[in-house]
Amino acid sequence: MIEQHQPRTRRWARRWWQAAFVLLLTATIVISAAPEASAYALYLLSGGINTVVSGAERVDGSHILLTGADETERDIVLEAGKKVTIRHSGIEQYATSRSGERVSALLQRESVSVGPLEMVRVDLSDDGVLLEIASDFTYYETVSEETAYQTVRKTDYTLSKGETRVERAGVKGHRDVTYEVVYADGVFVSRQAVSASAGNAVDEIVRVGTLVKEAQPGDTIASVVTNADGSGYLLLASGDSLHFTGSMDVRCTAYTSGERGVGTRTYTGTAVHVGVVAVDKSVIPLGTTMFIASNDGVYTYGMGHAEDTGVRGKSVDLYMDTLAACKQFGMRGGTAYFLD
C-alpha cells in the first residue's frame, strides 16, 4: 500500500507545480501586456527635504525602481488607509489607499493616466500621500556631502628651516548642500547648489620651521623674541629666524685695511673681509658668531665673526671694504646678538 501511494503523491505534486507555473506565466503575460501597467513617466519620491529621483528610463508601474532609495521604498507600496490627494492639471481628487497598493495601481483605479512627458511626484512627507502629476517640476533636495579639511601652515621660528611638524591632525567633515533640481517634459534640465552649511571639517595645522644658522646678506631684524634667561630669537625680514644665546649692548666702529697700519690678515690668521669683527677677546671670545645691528634701527651689519682684536671693553670694530663706508658709518650704539 505504501509503495503504491508514494508514486501517486509525486504525480499529484508534479501536476500542481505545472499548473502553478502556467498560472504564473499567464499572469506575467497579462501584466506585461497591460498598457496601464507601465508608462514613460518619471517618478519622484519625496520624503521631506530629501528627494530621490528615478532614472529617465522606462518605468515599470508594477516595480518602480528608485535610484538610491531604501529597499523598503523601491516599490512605493502605499500603507492601507492612507488619504491620497491626486493633483493633475489644476484639479484635485481624493482616494484612500488599499493594503499593498502601489502608486501605479492606485492611479489606474482612479482612472488617472500619466502622459509620456509627464512626471509623478510622490510626496510622503505628511500623514497623507500627495501624488502630483505635471510636465515641469522644480524641487529642492538637501544632501550631506563629505568635505575635505584644509591645511593651515604656520611659521615656527623654533624649528629648522624646511622642517614641518603637525600640530593638529585634520579631520574630514560634512556639510549640508541644498540643490535646486529642475525637470521639464520628463527630462532632467539642471541641478545646481543654491546654499550650503559651513561644514564641520577640522583644519590641519602644520608648523613650518624658519630657523637658520646664518642670515642672508642684507637681511634685517623685523622683531625680537627674548626669553627670561636672555636668550631668544631674531625674526628677520626675509622670514628666516636666528637663535641667540644672549646679547650685549656695544659701541660700534668700523675699520678697513690699509688705514692705521691695518693689514690684510686678522689676529686669528684669516684674510680680512666683510663680516670680520675686531673684539676685546676678554669680553667677547674669539670665534664668537654674532648678528649686529645699530640700536637706532638705521644700520644692520648682519652676520659677524670675532676673528680680530684691537678694541677694549664692550666694543666691536666692523670690517668694511672702503674707507668711505667706514666714515659714513662713524660710531654708533648697537647690539651684538650671540648666535649658536
Image (cartoon, rainbow, N blue to C red):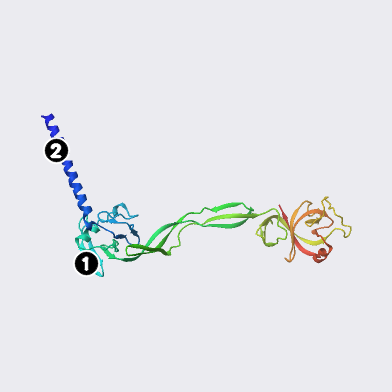
Horizontal and vertical percent position of residue 205: 54, 56
Say which of 169 and 133 sits in front.
Answer: 133
Nearer to me, 177 or 92? 92
| Residue at 22 percent of width and 54 percent of height | 33
Q: Amino acid at mark 1?
A: Gln
Question: Quick check: marks 2 and 1 in contact, CB under 8 Å?
Answer: no
Q: Any mark on residue 12, and which?
A: 2
Q: Nearer the viewer, residue 92 or 89?
A: 89
**Residue lying furthest right:** 261
Write down the residue under mark 1.
93
Q: Position of residue 24 (x, y in %)?
A: 20, 47
Whole-number angstrom distance, CA of label 2 to CA of label 1: 50 Å
Q: Position of residue 26 (x, y in %)?
A: 19, 49
Q: Indicate the secondary structure of the residue bearing disc 2.
A: helix
On screen, residue 118 versus residue 278, left or right, reads: left
Callout 1: helix, strand or loop? Answer: strand
User: Badge 2: few (under 14), some or many (20 or more) residues near its Cα, within 10 Å?
Assistant: few
Residue 243 sits in which quadrant? bottom right
Sequence-first tag of 2 and 1: 2
Quarter of the figure that contains the N terminus: top left
Mark 1 is surrounded, within 10 Å at the Cα level, by few (under 14), some (14 to 19) or many (20 or more) other residues, namely few
Camera-nearest label, 2 or 1: 2
What amino acid does circle 2 point to? Trp
In the displayed structure, does residue 94 sit left or right of residue 290?
A: left
Residue 181 image label: none
Where residue 253 sits, quadrant-wise, is: bottom right
Outermost residue, bottom side: 90
Residue 125 placement: quadrant: bottom left
Q: Left or right of 79: which side holds 231?
A: right
